[in-house]
Image (tube, helix red, strand yellow):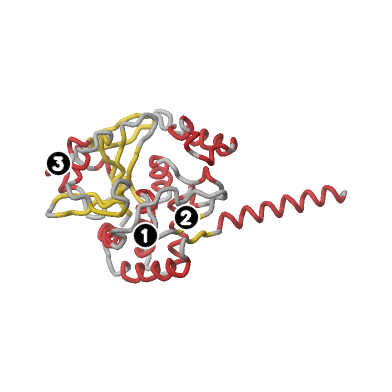
Amino acid sequence: MKKTAIALLLAIATLNLHAAGHRNEVRFHDEANDTTRITEILLEAEKISKPGDRISAIAHKFIDTPYVAHTLEDSVEVLTVNLDELDCTTFVETVMALAYTAGERRNSWRDYVYNLRRMRYRGGEVNGYPSRLHYISDWIVDNSHRGNFSEVTDRLPFARSVIKTINFMSKHHDRYPALADSANLDAILAVEQGYRNHQYPIIRSNALGNKQLCQSLREGDIVALTTSNKNLDVSHLGIITFVNGKPHLLHASSSLKKVTVTTVPLSEFMRKNPSLTGIRVIRLND
């Protein structure tokens, strides 16, 4: 074999190894404190048997954590662990991965990192920007298929189906720096092809004050808030917590700039935000 061909094969092998390394790499915001805190949370949470109660207990530990957007964005896509700065999506992902790991009776930060990767990325593998599950519908489908959690919306009172084409990212690609790369844009377009005329269940906002529905929701339910925004399915995520017997939203609030519990019940919160059309409900499997 000619030397140039050998050199080319070696170069390809090196690139593949480098890519594999990125797939397994973790970027911590504060490695020493984060790993210690993860272990402490897991040791405490593994004593809680019900998944919803476990989610709620963990979520409450993050109250007053600052809201910071775009903490996952970097020139290279790697798994990011940041317990000190959260947006609505990273808050829910962080809590769910911690609750899932504690439910396995595992208390190592490495186990948490493994489960966070499984929940955040398609097939549980980091393979560039498009492998992150950007759309909540995509996140639900992929994780439900792998048994990480289940959507229960259609089992609850007043559920109905809607059909929507989800392609907000490609329609607004100028808002996403990573989509300046044509390969990333093409990959996102390919994902969006699977969500043309996508049918999914929701519970409309006007049903959220109904007593029967409130009794069907559980502490620690994950709720995806659906939007009237064209080409987009969900615009916010949070966690149900009951206050005086009524479901409130525990979430990372962009307006209040911190993780907090809404001062009003979920039904009133939705009424005050007319662009929100309803909810989808997700639960960790028992």
Label 1 crowding class (10 Å Cα cut-off): few <14, some 14-19, many 20+? many
Residue 51, picture quadrant:
bottom left
Label 3 crowding class (10 Å Cα cut-off): few <14, some 14-19, many 20+? some
Give the mark nearest the N terminus, 1 or 2: 1
Amino acid identity at mark 1? Tyr
Q: Which residue is mark 3?
A: 209
Percent coordinates x, y for residue 104 in the rendering: 38, 64
Closer to the camera in the image, 84 or 27: 84
The relative height of residue 247 versus residue 47 in the rendered view (above or below) is above
Q: Which residue is mark 1?
A: 100
Percent coordinates x, y for residue 161 in the rendering: 29, 32
- Left or right of residue 134: residue 62: left
Closer to the camera in the image, 219 or 26: 26
Q: Distance between the Cα atoms at labels 3 and 1?
A: 30 Å
Amino acid identity at mark 2? Arg
Residue in view at x 32 percent, y 45 percent? 151
| Quadrant occupied by the C terminus | bottom left
Between disc 3 and disc 1, the foreground one is 3
Give the mark nearest the N terminus, 3 or 1: 1
Label 2 crowding class (10 Å Cα cut-off): few <14, some 14-19, many 20+? many
Amino acid identity at mark 3? Gly
Mark number displayed over residue 266: none
The relative height of residue 59 versus residue 108 in the rendered view (above or below) is above
Residue in view at x 49 percent, y 36 percent? 191
Residue in view at x 86 percent, y 51 percent? 3
Q: Distance between the Cα atoms at labels 3 and 2?
A: 36 Å
Q: Which residue is mark 2?
A: 117
Circle 1/circle 2 CB separation < 8 Å: no
Closer to the camera in the image, 176 or 240: 176
- Left or right of residue 285: residue 217: left
Q: Distance between the Cα atoms at labels 1 and 2?
A: 12 Å
Percent coordinates x, y for residue 49 in the rendering: 27, 65
